[in-house]
Image: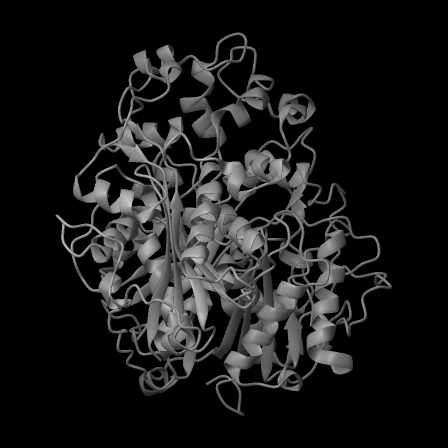
Amino acid sequence: MSVVVTGVGLVTPYGLDLVSNVRGFFARDTPATPPPEGERPALLHPFVARVPPDFDPARWVRRRKELKLMARANVLAVAAASLAVTDAGLEAGEPLEAAGLFLGVGQEPGDLDDVLPAVAASRTADGAHVDLRRLSEDGLRQMNPLSSIKTLPNMSHAHVAIALGLRGPGMTLCAGPASGLAAFDAAVRAIEDGRTDVALAGAADAPIAFSDRVSAARRAEYGPRAEAAVVLVVESAARASARGARVLLSPDALLADGEDGAPPFGDAGAASWLVSRVLTALARTPDRPTPEMAPRAPAVIRSTPRRAVALTGVGLRTPLGQHFDAFAQALLAGTSAVGPIGAFPREGFPVSLACEVPRNAAALPEALAQKMRGLDDRKGELALAAALAAVSDATGALSPDAAIVYGTGLSSVSLAELEEDCLPFLNEAGAYDYARFGAAPPPANPQAPRRHAVERPMELLAAHLGLRGRRLHHFSACAAGAAAIGHAADLVRRGEVDVALAGAADSMVHPFGLLPFILLGATSPIPDPLTAARPFDQHRDGFVMGEAGAFYVLEPLERARAAGRRVYGILLGHGTSSDAFNVTAPHPEGRGAELAMRRALADADLRPEAVDYINAHGTGTALNDVIEAAAIRRVFGTHAPPVSSSKGQFGHTIAAAGAVELAACLAALAFDRLPPNPTLAQVDARIDLDLVERGGRAGRVAVALSNSFGFGGQNATLIVGRADDAGAA
């Protein structure tokens, strides 16, 4: 299927129209200015390039309440997406609900002002540390429960979907200037695969906050830092032709190999390379920039037959076990990992329970351990340990060109980082003393920027294993793990790679990881490990936080069998969607959840009755469980398969949830037993599902489905099946 670009939306320091952008780009204009005056005693460079001052966020986001929830990059993304839709001629009654959304985003480290009041109110007497008791009693009251929403990188995706009503397939990719190009490539592939016939694709980033510039300076990057967004409308050529759309570009013009670099206005993070390529492609010549382009020939798409994708290596670092068989047996036996928090002193903290991986389980080879030493990066350690375990489990499977597809979550602020870059520079009034920061010697081994670099664990892994293939990073909140695995499966079955290593890791079992969820009322305050996590129960009151790393080796089934490797299951299909409803709550009818499941079934070419078991997202929150149950009922009808949620046993592992819960589905395939709902005592009367009993249930499982629904309304569903009728090979 041929694919074309029919609309472009640009929001850059050069302006919002194409002519200004092309002119500024080829004139090499650098509209950067010094940072805010108050911050200059700390950091004069790098300079900052902002979009023109007449940019009015209210033009694109009319509700003031929504603007308060949006980081700068979110606003830029909505503006660029709206401009692209207009440029493509899609506003006049053109339905966009089925359109996909693929965005590259940068990390949102948050505004220093958002955390300062809580930190200042929680200092120890000497001002050198955070007193967790004071944080619980005083600091918590200084925190805006919604301010943390702005720090989630997938919020640009959420706000664009809401603004334009997009519920099609999509993903959020993070890490580095290539993220926008990777998102565009993914959109083209989604259309090529028939997942949608129109999508918005691009990137938005605003790495200009004080913390961003500190990180840049510590990397010796003193060129201008900029804010920018670019979004393209991508369509099948047939659809574009049918509606008489103007064709601007073929994907080849942007995806062909070439030199990459930041635009002249500065480093715009995830948007950098895509902005440069778009402006270069749209200009006929450097000395005659013009947006009036003759239609170009569409790309030639070379389709390949789909290959069956086998899961041959499983690497787990979970609260229930570190090897697949041990994990499966503990899960199926109803074992609970809920227990007192051990990661930090919990006395006086609002929640006292978590599901933690034993500390020694994340031990790394010395070469990797040395590179991670001194960092407060638990999720990175879990990722590396799980990935290495998967590689070991599928001996000989990886080739140097293997792809790595990683799902991960927000790094948040850590106590170690606060004690390094924040607490020493607060004055008695709790304000930040930029002059004192500027006069202090830099830390010898700073937390920032290394612990905020999403891509760092996989860069270390690739170097350790000698891998030179593609590396992709999914950042879609609680859907990240499932989205990463589905993406990797597509790479393998299309023949783009022969083997991929895919999975996810996360750990929010630390004070500033837990606090946002506590403030939003998502975590259970119950101190009793037996009743704190109760998905689907009438008396559920939230989840218990977990942590985990889970990775898989994915390769063609025939390749795995020829090598004699154990095949844990076949990745039959996956589906994604957006709720396009609200950044803090799921769609009340579970519309996005339903679409993700239906798309996964269509991708697997299965009817609903072929599914033998569902591992639900099942967070144990008041809204999620009822809404997910209703969505399952609409998809599967009155004969919906048995359902359970494993979060009652190993907690909510956030970005890792889809990856570790896939292992729960593989356990059902391997042992012909349905994972239980061991904490379910009294079913909510509104939940009309066949919920597996507390003790589990014997039963043959040939096909299992796993749901993962992310904060901000991104959803992903995976479907796995047996390698053959005889079970796992």
Q: Which colour assignment does the render follow?
A: one colour
Q: 632 or 416: which is nearer to us?
A: 632
The image position of residue 221, as x and y in percent, is 23, 33
Quadrant in the picture for residue 47: top left
Q: Is 688 positioned to the left or the right of 243 in the image?
A: right
Where 207 sits versus 557, above or below? Answer: above
Query: Which quadrant: the N terminus?
Result: bottom left
Measuring 67% from the left and 55% from the top, which residue is drawn there? 586
Quadrant in the picture for residue 687: bottom right
Measuring 48% from the left and 35% from the top, which residue is drawn there? 56
Where 498 sits versus 707, above or below? Answer: below
Q: Is 322 positioned to the left or the right of 560 in the image?
A: right
The image position of residue 194, as x and y in percent, is 44, 78
Q: Is residue 64 visible?
A: yes
Measuring 48% from the left and 85% from the top, which residue is drawn there? 723
Q: Is 549 positioned to the left or the right of 271 in the image?
A: right
Q: 286 or 155: which is nearer to us?
A: 286
Extreme residue toward the top, this view: 428
Measuring 64% from the left and 34% from the top, which residue is drawn there? 145
The image position of residue 28, as x and y in percent, is 17, 38
Where 339 sits versus 129, above or below? Answer: below
Q: Is residue 640 visible?
A: no
Q: Is 599 positioned to the left or the right of 396 in the image?
A: right
The image position of residue 385, as x and y in percent, is 40, 55
Count of labels shown? 0
Extreme residue toward the bottom, this view: 725
Where 327 sits versus 634, above or below? Answer: above
